[in-house]
Amino acid sequence: MAEEHPLVQLARRAIESYVREGVVIRPPKELTEEMKRRAGTFVSLHRHGQLRGCIGTIEPVRANVAEEVIANAISAATRDPRFSPLRPDELEDLEISVDVLSEPEPISSLAELDPKVYGVIVESGRRRGLLLPDLEGVDTPEQQVAIALRKAWIDPTEPYRMYRFRVERYH
């Protein structure tokens, strides 16, 4: 297996420690520059090419990216409502990616979106939906926004705001 990025290694350690022992790890004493930043992060888990969990934060809610990744990795493994919690026997062939989000910027039309480059956030009142960029099977801004609206329980006929963001994706 190719060497994993330090953020992915951190997510893997967090998941393994929590799933095997119920222990939440602490961030490393020496943080990389990426880990020191404050940003929203998403941790995505796949097994055998199938999604197995994905949880994240749109904006930073913790002191730094390292803490965001630890919390979101554990949540992706154990609290994604679409899946049962990860079992220890699933850890060996787990594929993990970590996305670090840029600051979301408001947009006024679909023309400002490219689903291969930008993720999208839709918002109406307190409901928000997010879709990460560069996902298999999401090829148009229309598809991307429709999925994000569904995730947020926003009817496409009601008024909503859109934001776009970029990600740095690590494997």
Image (tube, rainbow, N blue to C red):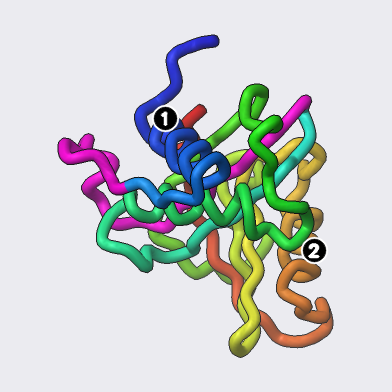
Q: Residue at x 69, y 41 (%)?
A: 87
Q: Which label is found at residue 21?
A: none
Residue 101 appears in the figure = no
- The amino acid type of the residue labelled 2 equals Ala
Which quadrant is the N terminus positioned in? top right
Mark 1, other Cα within 10 Å: few <14 / some 14–19 / many ≥20: some
Q: Which residue is label 2 attached to?
A: 146
Q: Is residue 134 magenta?
A: no
Q: Which label is found at residue 9?
A: 1
Q: Residue at x 76, y 53 (%)?
A: 84
Examine the rendered structure and indicate whether residue 164 appears above or below residue 170: below
The location of residue 162, given as percent across then percent down, is 60, 70
The location of residue 79, given as percent across then percent down, is 64, 59
What residue span does the magenta drawing correspond to? 26-48
Mark 2, other Cα within 10 Å: few <14 / some 14–19 / many ≥20: some
- The amino acid type of the residue labelled 1 equals Gln
